[in-house]
Image (cartoon, rainbow, N blue to C red):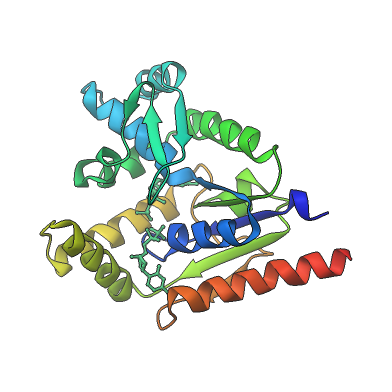
């Protein structure tokens, strides 16, 4: 039935995953889960405590004592690490440039993956990340792999930064995005890769609404096939 559809949206940094996933979730009244925010929240807490981010046991101690929660907010949901509202802090450069290190730790991935699967058990969900279609929700009924050129993705992040008054050059952003994509694609534990049954959408020259329409149509097609 329509209550249990799982939509997995994966792809590299700034391909538009979270923007599009939120709108698709809203359209169907499904839950939206930003799995990158979970890795970011753990990275934020590990940096706060001055940990060596390659020390798996130390980072796992953080995971064990730091429940990550999402609560409704405007315009976006709020993210809590324990009792702290980290909604803004997890988007800062320090977290962005270190999150791939934390996300490469297999025990951290296993623990967060289990939390994601528990959230998905409730019903219809749109989840975005790097390994949703391959590892977190391997039997998701609709799997999308969003792509866009590095140049276009850096431009998108540049525009977002401008709106927030953050000054990082386009060249630096391109470099940061390329570095993170490389790390995310080359780690041993569930690397960023397109699931065999995922549909590739190159969004380089598409608007947000065009991408949302395509995904909504794919979900509708699935629902219609179910009758
Ligand atoms: O929004 P942006 O593309 O910058 O990244 P994000 O979705 O917030 O994810 C931040 C980082 O978390 C990624 O670069 C990955 O290192 C990691 N991540 C992951 O490994 N697996 C996921 N399912 C989601 C995020
Ligand atoms: O989650 P991810 O890192 O993949 O990307 P995002 O945080 O959704 O950021 C993508 C940015 O590109 C947002 O500012 C969108 O408005 C913009 N954008 C898009 O997402 N999709 C398009 N087809 C065109 C622009």
Q: Residue, x 40% and y 16% (percent of image)?
A: 61
Q: Residue, x 66% and y 47% (percent of image)?
A: 137
Furthest residue to the bottom? Answer: 205
Please provide percent x and percent y for residue 198.
64, 65
Q: Is residue 112 above or below residue 208?
A: above
Determine which quarter of the picture holds residue 169: bottom left
Query: Does residue 201 appear left or right of residue 223 in this picture?
Result: left
Q: Residue, x 39% and y 39% (percent of image)?
A: 78
Query: Does residue 9 appear left or right of residue 103 in this picture?
Result: right
Q: Which of 213 and 149 is in front in this view?
A: 213
Residue 103 visible in the displayed image: no
Q: In this view, does 49 lie above or below 198?
A: above
Determine which quarter of the picture holds residue 99: top left
Q: In this view, does 101 lie above or below 114?
A: below
Q: Which of 115 and 161 is in front in this view?
A: 161
Residue 214 visible in the displayed image: yes
Please provide percent x and percent y for residue 36.
43, 45
Q: Quadrant of the N terminus?
A: bottom right
Please provide percent x and percent y for residue 88.
27, 42
Determine which quarter of the picture holds residue 181: bottom left
Q: Which of 174 and 166 is in front in this view?
A: 166
Q: Residue, x 70% and y 37% (percent of image)?
A: 121
Counting the numbered discs, the total is 0
Query: Does residue 67 appear left or right of residue 176 in this picture?
Result: right
Please provide percent x and percent y for residue 91.
28, 46
Q: In which quarter of the image is the C terminus?
A: bottom right
Furthest residue to the front? Answer: 74
């Amino acid at each position: 039935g329509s209550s249990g559809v799982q939509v997995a949206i994966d792809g590299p940094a700034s391909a538009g995953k979270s923007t599009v996933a939120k709108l698709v979730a809203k359209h169907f009244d499904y839950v939206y889960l930003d799995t990158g925010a979970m890795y970011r929240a753990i990275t934020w807490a590990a940096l706060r405590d001055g940990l060596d981010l390659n020390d798996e046991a130390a980072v796992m101690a953080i995971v064990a004592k730091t429940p990550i929660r999402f609560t409704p907010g405007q315009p976006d949901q709020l993210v809590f690490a324990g009792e702290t509202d980290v909604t803004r802090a997890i988007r800062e450069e320090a977290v962005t440039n270190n999150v791939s290190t934390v996300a490469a730790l297999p025990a951290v991935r296993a623990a967060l993956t289990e939390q994601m699967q528990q959230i998905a058990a409730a019903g219809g969900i749109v989840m975005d990340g790097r390994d949703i279609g391959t590892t977190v929700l391997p039997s998701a009924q609709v799997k999308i792999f969003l792509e866009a050129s590095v140049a276009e993705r850096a431009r998108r992040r540049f525009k977002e930064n401008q709106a927030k008054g953050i000054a990082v050059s386009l060249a630096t952003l391109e470099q940061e995005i390329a570095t993170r994509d490389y790390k995310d694609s080359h780690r041993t534990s569930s690397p960023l890769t397109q699931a065999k049954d995922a549909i590739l959408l190159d969004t380089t020259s598409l608007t947000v609404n065009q991408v949302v329409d395509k995904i909504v149509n794919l979900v509708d097609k699935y629902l219609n096939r179910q009758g």
